[in-house]
Image (cartoon, coloured by chain):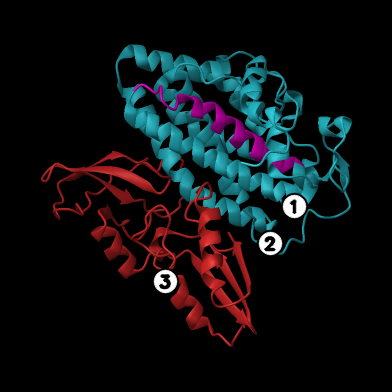
Chain colours: A red, B cyan
């Protein structure tokens, strides 16, 4: 039943696969798909985890595989650290989708990795995804998932979450 | 979860030596391959994995009982990071030395672990927990910055990713350091006393590894571990001075070494392996 497929079809299909923890964003817009390779009827996809300890990695790989099986019977999904995901890989559309779902997108560029043991810097205020105010403050750099931080908006008095810049 | 398989062309030479008297071997059920005889690279991976696993597990005990809700969330999240890092190291280790991450993590006797005493002893009260985190995270950062240059590409790549996450851990310990250092006398004194008391155990993080010379020769370790210890101490010196901690007056460290013989670790080990022991071979 396998008919000829091309890489674009695979990318298009991957747009249907949401992040399980933040379904507003697809795995493509999250920037975690490193590569797509199509050879004959075979499809191979490499996934770059947002966080090493992310418990959703297995679910993401399973969802990617399930979606691509509608295109091909031979699908391989692998996890790689050969290249490292950073939040700068989130697409413009992904950032907009995050904001619309109530998550402030990560600041760009992500903080550089120096050799400094004490990287603490004051967080610049970010924009509240609900009212647009910049009178916001970081409440906790750690949140309900590894990739989210908790902020508070002094204007609309709402706590909100930010996708961490890493 | 499986790691991407990447080119590995170092640390794989024939220099193989017994690592541990793994208890699984005596109990039978030995996986195929030479379990108990592993490449030198595995000695390094096991030390890294055990440190991360044990501090992650120990710190996770604050879940639900941290002094404030924000720290409850922070400690849980940090612990989850560390255990995730341990899993990634155990996956590299399993690829090199056989076994599975779960077997390495949960099916060894306490004496077979290769974590530093710093992480194997209990977390203590909040000041002590933060003192331990401060020592551990700064030492781990020095170690990871160096390992990012490792000639063993799968390790260097993994470490490059880890460092992005560890930035947040460093900010966390720095925040608490500032709070204690600038705060009321009691907090500062208790924090300083905990740093001084934990110091000798922290030196275990830089204990020499079996076969270290060969690992350095091959570039798997970009530099001797003693060089890392010196750099760490130099980078920490201004902070220690600010706290008024004189580590030269700390109790004698003895010979730095790795191992799970600490009595506190026996308790933690029992907790950590309880589910795995109740139902051997179960998947979860």
Q: What kind of element bears circle 3? A: loop
Residue at x 79% of width, y 47% of height: B98
Disc 2 crowd rating (10 Å Cα; few below 14, some 14-19, many 20+) is some
Measuring from the top left, give residue A166's x and y in whole percent: 41, 53
Callout in the foreground (3, 2) = 3
Callout in the foreground (1, 3) = 3
A96 horizontally vs B203: left or right: left
Residue at x 45% of width, y 52% of height: A113
Residue at x 42% of width, y 71% of height: A15
Magenta region: B43-67
Q: Residue A15 bears which disc, if any? A: 3
Label 2 and label 1: CA atoms lie apart by: 9 Å
Disc 3 crowd rating (10 Å Cα; few below 14, some 14-19, many 20+) is some
Disc 1 crowd rating (10 Å Cα; few below 14, some 14-19, many 20+) is some
Residue at x 36% of width, y 41% of height: A143
Q: What kind of element bears circle 2? A: loop
Q: What kind of element bears circle 1? A: helix
Q: Residue B5 bears which disc, if any? A: 2
Q: Which of the 4 quarters of the picture holds residue B253?
A: top right
Measuring from the top left, give residue A108's x and y in whole percent: 33, 60
Label 1 and label 3: CA atoms lie apart by: 33 Å
| Residue A48 in view (yes/no) | no
Tell me the subunit letter for badge 1.
B
Find disc 1 in the rendering and name its residue: B95
Label 3 and label 2: CA atoms lie apart by: 26 Å
Measuring from the top left, give residue B154's x and y in whole percent: 66, 57
**Chief secondary structure of the magenta portion:** helix
Q: Nearer the viewer, residue A49 or A107?
A: A49
Question: Does residue B45 show up magenta in the picture?
Answer: yes
């Amino acid at each position: 039943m396998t008919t000829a497929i091309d890489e674009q079809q695979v990318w298009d299909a991957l747009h249907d696969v949401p992040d399980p923890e933040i379904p507003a964003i697809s795995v493509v817009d999250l920037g975690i798909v490193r590569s797509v390779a199509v050879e004959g009827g075979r499809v191979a996809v490499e996934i770059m985890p947002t966080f090493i300890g992310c418990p959703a990695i297995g679910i993401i790989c399973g969802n990617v595989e399930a979606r691509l099986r509608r295109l091909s019977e031979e699908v391989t999904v692998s996890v790689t650290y050969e290249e490292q995901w950073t939040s700068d890989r989130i697409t413009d559309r992904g950032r907009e989708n995050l904001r619309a779902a109530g998550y402030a997108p990560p600041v760009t560029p992500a903080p550089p990795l120096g050799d400094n043991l004490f990287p603490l810097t004051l967080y610049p205020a970010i924009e509240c995804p609900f009212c647009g105010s910049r009178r916001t403050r970081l409440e906790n750099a750690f949140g309900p998932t590894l990739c989210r931080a908790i902020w508070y908006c002094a204007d609309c008095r709402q706590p909100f979450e930010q996708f961490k810049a890493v | 979860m499986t790691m991407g398989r990447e080119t590995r062309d170092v640390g794989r030479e024939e220099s193989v030596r017994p690592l541990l008297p793994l208890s699984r071997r005596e109990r039978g059920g030995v996986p195929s391959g030479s379990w108990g005889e592993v490449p030198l690279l595995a000695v390094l991976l096991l030390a890294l994995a055990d440190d991360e696993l044990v501090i992650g597990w120990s710190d996770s005990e604050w879940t639900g009982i941290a002094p404030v809700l924000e720290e409850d969330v922070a400690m849980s999240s940090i612990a989850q990071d560390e255990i995730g890092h341990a899993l990634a190291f155990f996956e590299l280790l399993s690829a090199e030395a056989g076994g599975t991450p779960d077997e390495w993590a949960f099916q060894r006797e306490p004496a077979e672990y290769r974590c530093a005493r710093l992480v194997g002893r209990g977390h203590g009260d909040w000041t002590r927990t933060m003192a331990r985190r401060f020592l551990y995270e700064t030492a781990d950062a020095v170690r990871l910055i160096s390992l990012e240059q490792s000639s063993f590409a799968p390790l260097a790549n993994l470490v490059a990713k880890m460092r992005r996450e560890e930035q947040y851990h460093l900010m966390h310990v720095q925040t608490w350091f500032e709070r204690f250092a600038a705060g009321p006398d009691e907090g500062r004194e208790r924090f300083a006393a905990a740093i001084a008391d934990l110091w000798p155990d922290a030196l275990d993080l830089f204990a020499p590894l079996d076969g270290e010379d060969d690992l350095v020769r091959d570039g798997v370790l970009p530099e001797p571990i003693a060089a890392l210890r010196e750099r760490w101490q130099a980078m920490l010196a201004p902070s220690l001075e600010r706290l008024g901690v004189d580590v030269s007056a700390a109790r004698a460290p003895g010979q730095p070494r790795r191992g799970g013989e600490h009595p506190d670790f026996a308790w933690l080990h029992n907790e950590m392996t309880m589910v795995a022991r109740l139902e051997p071979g179960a998947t979860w």
